[in-house]
Amino acid sequence: MRILSIISGKGGVGKTTIAANLSLALSKLGFNTTVVDLNITTPDLGFYFGHYTPEVGLQDILKDPEKLPKGIYIHSEGIKILPGKLQIERWEDVDLSNLNKIINSLNADFVVLDSAAGLGREALASLSLATDVLVITNPELPTLIDALKVIKVAENLNKNILGIALNRVGRSKKEIKKDYVERLLGYKVLAEIPEDKWVVRALEEKIPLISFNPHCRASIEIMNLAFAILGTPYRIKPSIWNKILFWK
Ligand code: ADP
Ligand code: MG
């Protein structure tokens, strides 16, 4: 089982968007995939799937791991989701000691961990559980500096850093280019996901982007990111994309 931590340092760069849709992409490619909301205090992964008022959330399962099966929601696309409850918990009361056991008991090819921003307790829990780390960043300096910090922490934990997903590319003509990002961060850019209006539209409809509009440029690049994570050299040719999409 591969446990993939999606992490960034800075908030609002696209971790949840990518965690949700990359998980769906892996699932569509035939891998048994569970995506987990590790933003324990501020969960929002459920919004990306139209499932945001779970009866049992990760917070309940942390208290009582026996509740795990009830907390897993199977989306119509086949992917499994372990969301958080929206209610604000007293953070001091949240005990993470069962997290390792819970995550490692998930029966999946891929467990994708949507992480919290920063390098606090929640983000560190995600990194320490990971077999593989994917760093999300935007092509602008403050986000890159935060990404660099996260990379240093992941390196100190001896984690396998797969590379970088550069998100919201094309917003500004002056943005930092891929080559510079690779030199600064020391890892390969696996995907350049464009700024795409369909991302927000899908979120408004509470349908994952690659289901809502599989043809848009961001969907295609997230699918390419899935191929890169699988270690394949393939990239989607938009002309054959239709045929792949309707495989079930
Ligand atoms: P994070 O989880 O890192 O805080 P989110 O995935 O929640 O970030 O994204 C933050 C906001 O940016 C959301 O409103 C999301 O719709 C938007 N967003 C993310 N990626 C893109 C993109 N490629 N194009 C346009 N909007 C995006
Ligand atoms: Mg998020």
Image (cartoon, grey):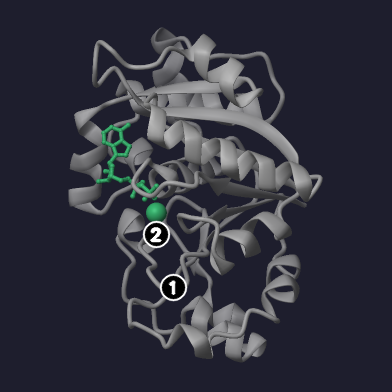
Of 176 and 242, the residue lying toward us = 176
In percent of width and height, residue 113 lies at 57, 55
Quarter of the image for residue 126 reads bottom right
Residue that carries the numbered disc 2 in the rendered image: 45
Q: Which mark is residue 149?
A: none
Among the two numbered marks 1 and 2 on one chain, the one whose residue lies closer to the N terminus: 2
Lateral position of residue 46 relative to residue 161, left or right: left
Q: Please provide percent x and percent y for residue 63.
A: 59, 90
Ligand 2 is within 8 Å of the C-beta of the residue at disc 2:
yes
**Disc 1 marks which amino acid?**
Gly
94 to the left or right of 232: left
Ligand 1 placement by image quarter: top left
Q: Residue at x 78, y 50 (%)?
A: 157
Rate crowding at label 2 as few (under 14), some (14 to 19) or many (20 or more) other CA atoms within 10 Å: many
The residue indicated by pointer 1 is 84
Q: Indicate the amino acid at tag 2.
A: Leu
Nearer to me, 53 or 211: 53
Examine the rendering and report whether any part of residue 25 can be seen.
no
Query: Residue at left 46%, top 65%?
Result: 39
Number of marks in the image? Answer: 2
Give the CA distance from mark 1 to mark 2. Answer: 8 Å
Whether label 1 touches label 2, CB < 8 Å: yes
Residue 69 location in percent, x, y? Answer: 60, 79
Residue 96: x and y, percent?
A: 63, 79
User: Relative to 234, does residue 146 appear above or below in the rendering?
Assistant: below
Image quadrant assignment for residue 229? top right
Q: Is residue 101 left or right of residue 245?
A: right
The answer to whether residue 105 is visible is yes
Q: Secondary structure at mark 1?
A: loop
SS at badge 2: helix
- Quadrant in the rendering for residue 238: top left
Instruction: Check disc 1: other Cα within 10 Å, few if <14, some if 14-19, many if 20+.
Output: many
